Image (tube, rainbow, N blue to C red):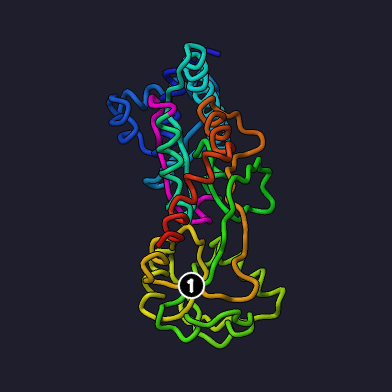
Amino acid sequence: MRTTLHQLKVFKQVALVMNYTKAGEILGLTQPAVSIQIKQLENNLGIMLFEKIGKTLYLTPAGKELRLFSDDIFSRFENMDMKLSALKGELQGDFYLSAVTSAKYFTPHLLGAFHKKYPKVNFHLDIVNREQIIQRLIDNKDDLVIMGLLPEKMPLARYPFVDNPIVLIASPEHPLALQKNIPLESLSEHAFLHREKGSGTRKALEEFLSGKGITLQVNMTLGNSETIKQAVMADLGISAVSRHSVILELATNSLVELDIIGFPLVKSWYIVHHESKHLSPIAAAFIEFILAQENVDILCNRFLAINEKL
């Protein structure tokens, strides 16, 4: 094996962007220099790593295997740096976290508190929908993920850390807004706004109502919680959301939480990673930090306390 780390680094970047010129720009190399490194790597291994069909570059089966290997080896180098830093009494390096859209209202507060404890950590946060989160888990793009409803057939390590109450919301002008102890069956009599298919909130609601034999009058499907909130404010219908996503709107009476029998549906927020994933020292420290209940309850529910005072 005459393969060098430099060749693997070049290969890893090309496999990421699937373009020799773009990879060269990122690495500070010319396109011919990138081509030479890839050719030498293929010669050393005795197998083709890329194939070009038309103008599009593809990884061969061998290239796909080498991409997994190179991701693993460079991740281990990064973890080595983190562990050596930890032995010196500090924690530093890059930390990649993604969260579903409904968790965006408290996740930055978790990172803010963690940053105060470990100021040399560089944070990378992506907020995406549930389907995108699942794909990121499949692609191993993040150190950790924050989500509610978990995929059923994926081997995941999961750490529940705070309740996720799913509530029904309406405009203050809605006929149900001032009623108490509303029968669950009343939901079928009013226009309902759904999240997009694949949403964890939608899936949890549908499973609950299906067990009760309740059918909704869905008159609109919207792509994210912000659009849902605006549509409900406009009195286009009622909807189900995580209470964490509407605390300020409830506090200012822009929205009301309906008093429906059987609600809220109390689920959990989870920190998630593949069971087989090698956690970096930062990721392990973040899990340990989040599972300290005295920290997480205050940080995630700080606006609940504000709402109660108002």
Q: Is residue 114 magenta?
A: no
Left or right: 173 as drawn, with respect to 145: left
The N terminus sits in image quarter: top right
| Percent coordinates x, y for residue 113 in the rendering | 43, 36
Which residue is under mark 1? 169
Name the residue: 50% across, 79% down. 192
Residue 254 is drawn in which quadrant? bottom left
Left or right: 102 as drawn, with respect to 270: left
Instruction: Give the vertical position of 249 relative to 51 (above or below).
Output: below
Which residue type carries mark 1? Answer: Ile
Residue 108 is drawn in which quadrant? top left
Instruction: Give the vertical position of 240 relative to 220 (above or below).
Output: above
Residue at the outermost front position: 309
Magenta segment range? 117-133
Identify the secondary structure beneath mark 1.
strand
The C terminus sits in image quarter: bottom left
| Percent coordinates x, y for residue 304 in the rendering | 47, 56
